[in-house]
Amino acid sequence: MMTLLKAGDPAPDFQAMDQSSRQIALASLQGKKVILFFYPKADTPGCTAEACNLRDHYSELLQKGFEIIGVSADDTQKQKKFTEKYQLPFPLLADTEKTVIRAYGAWGPKQFMGKKFDGIHRMTFVISEEGIIEKVFDKVETKSHAEQILKEYP
């Protein structure tokens, strides 16, 4: 069952390893706006389009005070390869136990080509400097996700 977090809810705190085996905690980012994006699998077409679109608008998002963190259930090795292959400038969390993914309600039933299965839903949460969810994107446009976010934060 998916928990549905919404704007105004406190963002669940988390600690997880990124692609460089650094521990990243939401609590350590207090005072910064965070774009937390969940994606199904590193180096697949949709996830690559989304990550590269955020990369291409990275400096613009940084200027607006955003930190960007990606999350999938891939291990640190896969996240590292994905980061290096596409020169991604932000941390990608290796949430192999799906702790963060479940805490944010990004895990649940999906359907692909007629098959039903549980998997990661592509979602993005914008978290305020105080750790409150400001915006939830549950219909992520992979090729223009940064523009989707920037439209909300002109």
Image (tube, grey):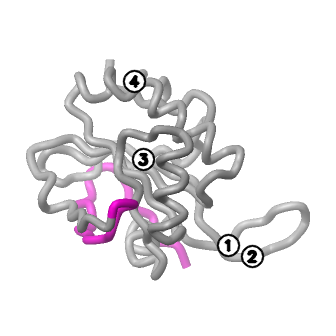
Q: Label 3: few (<14), some or many (≥20) within 10 Å?
A: many
Q: CA distance from mark 1 to mark 2?
A: 6 Å
Which mark sits nearer the N-terminus, 3 or 1? 1
Which mark sits nearer the N-terminus, 2 or 3? 2
In the picture as drawn, the residue positioned furthest to the top comes out as 154
> Which mark's residue is nearer the viewer, 2 or 3?
2
Left/right placement of residue 75 relative to residue 110 reads: left
Q: Quadrant of residue 115?
A: bottom right
The amino acid pointed to by label 2 is Phe
From the top left corner, tell me how far across and down residue 19 is, in percent.
39, 60
Left/right placement of residue 111 relative to residue 120 reads: right
Would you name the residue on which mark 3 appears?
Answer: 136
Would you name the residue on which mark 4 appears?
Answer: 150
Which mark sits nearer the N-terminus, 4 or 3? 3
Q: Residue at x 80, y 74 (%)?
A: 116
From the top left corner, tell me how far across and down residue 66 is, in percent.
26, 35
Asked if residue 19 lies in the magenta stretch, the reply is: yes
Q: CA distance from mark 4 to mark 3?
A: 13 Å
The amino acid pointed to by label 3 is Val
Q: Residue at x 59, y 65 (%)?
A: 120
Q: Residue at x 24, y 68 (%)?
A: 23
User: How many numbered tags mark residues here?
Assistant: 4
